[in-house]
Image: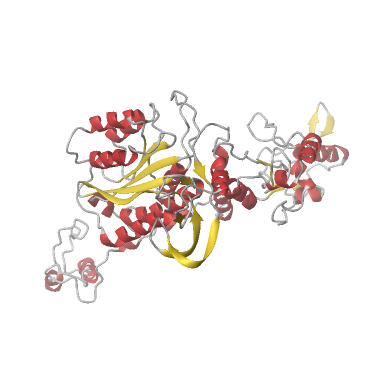
């Protein structure tokens, strides 16, 4: 008893407090076990509460990687099918996108506002909100200029109640990436966030942008409150007057003023305000802002022409200064109006202000106006028409149930067989003996996907990887581009109409003629066969 009382140190935590002792007292076996357990759990702490010299300072819960989120057990107890299904569902999630050609603003001016307050030090996002936000911000800058090469971007931070300018409005992604990299080492999240100060600085940044482009603000908000010097509703009215659309990504919970801000600047639509669920959802909400917004029909603008220059790259024998960075270079792009040299495109000429782009930049922005149609999954009834992918020539899987006929095994009746173990038995009705066929199984396992996806125009089959590459990077169908217009029309007329026509049964699943054919053949074979009473049947696919 004395030994256990000597080693016991009362801690402020409720988990470390000892349980109620039994009637045996401390001298029994139970008291000795409890004292030994307390000594083993507290051997890394001294009596004054400080950690022992050999003990680690990090808690165990700080190293948890949440591996259980990736393990989902299927109905059969295996996780292989679940993992494959999740991967396929992730790749095919783009089918939910609307591919209707609508008018969008392809020349964009966007201000990215990052929350750099003390709320970004939380570790609910690995490693912290701040570090993960900086990493996603760098990915966003790269993807933004990849999808919108003739647009411009500016980055602002909310730090210690003030608005901090990270990078100016420009079209060079290298400048923004360098600024984000510098802030990762020089700025630490501190203080409170101020929505009003950040929105006012963003409004001033977008005030002088031309009217032919869009004005947008993407706000990453991790706090639950805002420390503003004035009335934020006045700022919201100013944003509406300047036709600035605000999109917000919340990291903690939905805030009422943020929802009001998004609704009033987007004509009552609050879909531009989303609260993240996890790291993957966080990235999806940010990357959704790379798509240009829809042009509102209520806006009345006079059609006008925008003057642009298309310079060619030249290589000089001697080095000369560029007009954009004042660096000595041997090559660059010469402005067709004032013959000034710039290092990169797209940009605005520092001397005359002419927009300088390449024809490929316009082509990359054009796909937002006329997106590539979604490809449809090919059923097994038409899968035999192709064996390899049209683009990468990778082989397609074959359906084993179609290549081999259905085998039916007839077992001889045994003495121990009962009525519950037989699937086809003899029944007597009014003294007559009849043979009943096996009932159709209502719980047949679903057929595996064909992994073939067909273009609705040229009817060419592609694999899932080429499908994703064509819709996210290429924005053109390789089959339609390689085939002539006459051949595309001919293939569309001679191809089976079940591909791309949206035919479905009552349950909403695509119809399959092969399944109906197999069921009919199996029923016919059972009717023609002679099955002895008390026998059982097995069907092998």
Residue at 52% in and 32% down: 103
Image x and y of residue 488, in percent? 76, 39
Image x and y of residue 178, in percent? 37, 59
Residue at 49% in and 30% down: 304
Image x and y of residue 77, in percent? 55, 53
Residue 389, above or below 492: below
Count the marks: how many?
Answer: 0
Residue 237, above or below 46: above
Residue 99, above or below 478: above
Quadrant occupied by the N terminus:
bottom left
36 to the left or right of 456: left
In this orientation, does residue 271 appear?
Answer: yes
349 to the left or right of 252: right
Q: Nearer the viewer, residue 460 or 403?
A: 460
Q: Residue 51's quadrant in the figure?
A: bottom left
Say how the picture is coloured. Answer: secondary structure
482 to the left or right of 362: right
Image x and y of residue 419, in percent? 71, 41
Residue at 87% in and 41% down: 530
Q: Nearer the viewer, residue 14 or 31?
A: 14
Q: Nearer the viewer, residue 26 or 410?
A: 410
Q: Nearer the viewer, residue 399 or 28?
A: 399
Q: Residue furthest front?
A: 338
Residue 464, above or below 7: above
In this orientation, does residue 438 appear?
Answer: no
């Amino acid at each position: 008893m004395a030994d256990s009382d000597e080693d016991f140190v009362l801690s402020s935590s409720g988990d470390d407090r000892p349980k109620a002792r039994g009637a045996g007292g401390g001298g029994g076996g139970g008291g000795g076990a409890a004292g030994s357990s307390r000594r083993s759990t507290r051997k890394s702490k001294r009596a004054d509460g400080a950690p022992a010299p050999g003990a680690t300072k990090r808690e165990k819960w700080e190293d948890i990687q949440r591996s259980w989120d990736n393990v989902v057990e299927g109905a059969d107890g295996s996780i292989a099918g679940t993992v494959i299904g999740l991967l396929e569902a992730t790749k095919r999630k783009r089918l939910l996108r609307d591919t209707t050609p609508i008018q969008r603003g392809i020349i964009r001016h966007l201000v990215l506002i990052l929350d750099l307050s003390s709320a970004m030090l939380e570790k609910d996002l690995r490693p912290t909100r701040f570090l993960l936000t900086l990493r996603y911000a760098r990915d966003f800058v790269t993807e933004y200029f990849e999808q919108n090469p003739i647009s411009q971007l500016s980055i602002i931070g909310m730090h210690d109640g003030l608005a901090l300018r990270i990078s100016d409005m420009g079209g060079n992604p290298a400048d923004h990436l360098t600024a984000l990299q510098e802030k990762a080492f020089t700025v630490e999240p501190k203080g409170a966030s101020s929505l009003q100060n950040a929105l006012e600085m963003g409004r001033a940044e977008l005030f002088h942008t031309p009217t032919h482009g869009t004005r947008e603000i993407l706000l990453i908000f991790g706090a639950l409150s805002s420390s503003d010097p004035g009335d934020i509703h006045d700022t919201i009215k100013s944003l509406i007057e300047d036709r600035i659309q605000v999109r917000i990504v919340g990291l903690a919970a939905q805030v009422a003023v943020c929802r009001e801000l998004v609704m009033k600047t987007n004509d009552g639509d609050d879909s531009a305000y989303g609260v993240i669920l996890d790291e993957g959802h966080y990235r999806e909400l940010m990357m959704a802002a790379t798509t240009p917004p829809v042009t509102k029909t209520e806006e009345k603008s006079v059609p006008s022409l925008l003057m642009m220059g298309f310079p060619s790259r030249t290589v000089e024998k001697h080095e000369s200064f560029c007009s954009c960075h004042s660096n000595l270079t041997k090559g660059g792009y010469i402005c067709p109006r004032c013959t000034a040299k710039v290092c990169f495109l797209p940009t605005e000429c520092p001397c005359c202000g002419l927009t300088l782009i390449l024809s490929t930049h316009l082509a990359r922005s054009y796909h937002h106006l006329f997106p590539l149609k979604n490809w449809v999954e090919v059923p097994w009834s038409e899968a035999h028409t192709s064996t390899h992918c049209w683009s990468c020539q990778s082989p397609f899987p074959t359906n084993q149930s179609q290549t081999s006929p259905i085998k039916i095994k007839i077992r001889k009746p045994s003495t121990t067989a009962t009525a519950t173990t037989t699937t086809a038995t003899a029944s007597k009705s009014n003294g007559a003996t009849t043979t009943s066929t096996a009932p159709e199984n209502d719980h047949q396992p679903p057929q595996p996907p064909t992994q073939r996806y067909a273009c609705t125009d040229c009817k060419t089959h592609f694999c899932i990887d080429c499908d994703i590459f064509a819709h996210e990077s290429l924005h053109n169908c390789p089959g339609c581009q390689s085939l002539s217009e006459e051949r595309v029309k001919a293939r569309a007329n001679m191809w089976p109409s079940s591909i791309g026509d949206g035919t479905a049964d009552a349950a909403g699943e695509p119809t399959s003629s092969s399944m109906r054919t197999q069921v009919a053949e199996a029923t016919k074979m059972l009717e023609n066969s002679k099955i002895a009473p008390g026998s059982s049947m097995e069907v092998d696919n």
